Image (cartoon, rainbow, N blue to C red):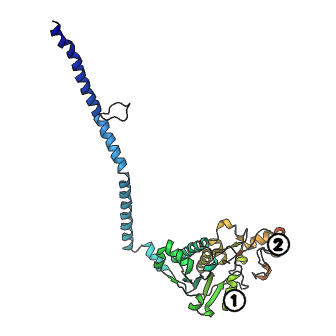
Amino acid sequence: MSSEMLPASIEPPNVEKKLGASDSEEERQKPRVDAGAEPMSKRQLKKLLKQKQWEEQREQRKEKRKEKRKRKKLARRQLESNSDGNDRKRTRRDVTRSSLRLIIDCSFDDLMVLKDIKKLHKQIQRCYAENRRAPHPVQFYLTSHGGQLKKNMDENDQGWVNWKDIHIKSEHYSELIKKEDLVYLTSDSPNVLKDLDESKAYVIGGLVDHNHHKGITFKQASSYGIEHAQLPLADFVKMNSRKVLAVNHVFEIILEFLETRDWQEAFFTILPQRKGAVPAHKACESSPQDHQSLPGGWDSASEGEHCRDDPDSPQKEEQGQQSSPVSAVSPVPQ
């Protein structure tokens, strides 16, 4: 009897063991979110896989959207080019090119460190872009192109070799244009421009030196025996501090004047607001002492004639403290 009951007493544990093994296998087959989570249903698993696939294809969807936008933009341009209302083509047809030649003289390469060469490069890029979109673009020249400037452009802006509507020359401007046609723009000149002669070639000194080489552009113009002049800035503008305008500011002011034929409008359209420029007549009305002396080396009584006193001398600083703190702006880099 004991032998008959023995299998019965042993059988239940074996069954439980097999059932336990089967349950464990099913548990292992069911995916879990983490060790302590409940097993997921087929619907949850399917949802999780779909979400994972969605995340993996995020970048692909982004690229598809970009391609779609590009195709739409291209189709729109093609449609516009086939119609009479193409704004871009109409703008180019309305351009009236000026015969005025505007030269950036890059012969000061050896006077600048690489940091300033890079600044000059950016200013030239700005001049090129503004001239391309101007309603009255000038004949743009870049002369004495070489040295550090050319190397920097080759390394950081290789597309410059494909620039249009610009004459980039390694020669000095004096070798390219007749002496009688040249006018060097320099704030040290006693001559003040009243208008622009479009038969002339105006030279802007391509120099970023933080005023370390004062009067160098005037000396160069005098040594070559060419005409020189300064923009009529002192006749129209007073500013909070003595500032030397960047090459691109001078360039843009001339472009603006060619369009408006109004110096004051040209100055106040181009000069950055942060420089605190105000009309000269308003500044003079608010401060009578400005009629006697304009800090920064300008004499209001002589219609913009340049004062020979050094604007940075101690004597000038004392005068500046006694009078208005407003000082003039040099129209071109020194």
Secondary structure under tag 2 reads helix
**Quadrant that contains the N terminus:** top left
Q: Quadrant of residue 145?
A: bottom right
Say which mark, if any, is on residue 314.
Answer: 2
Callout 1: few (<14), some (14-19), or many (20+) C-alpha neighbours within 10 Å?
some
Q: Is residue 24 above or below residue 144?
A: above
Q: Is residue 294 above or below residue 32?
A: below
Point 61% across, 91% down: residue: 181
Callout 2: few (<14), some (14-19), or many (20+) C-alpha neighbours within 10 Å?
few
- Disc nearer the start of the sequence (2/1): 1
Please, what is the three-letter code of the amino acid marked with disc 1? Ser
Front position in the image: 207 or 44: 207
Q: Quadrant of residue 229?
A: bottom right
Real-space Cα separation, disc 2 to disc 1, in angstroms:
28 Å
Q: Quadrant of residue 11?
A: top left
Point 70% across, 69% down: residue: 277
- Percent x, y of residue 25: 26, 30
**Quadrant that contains the C terminus:** bottom right
- Percent x, y of residue 157: 49, 73
Task: Please give the count of numbered marks on the rendered protein.
Answer: 2
Point 50% across, 75% down: residue: 154
Would residue 161 be visible to someone looking at this image? yes
Q: Is residue 172 left or right of residue 313?
A: left
Q: Name, please, the residue furthest toward the front.
A: 3
Say which mark, if any, is on residue 157.
Answer: none
- The residue at which mark 1 appears reads as 222
Front position in the image: 233 or 195: 233
Point 69% across, 82% down: residue: 216
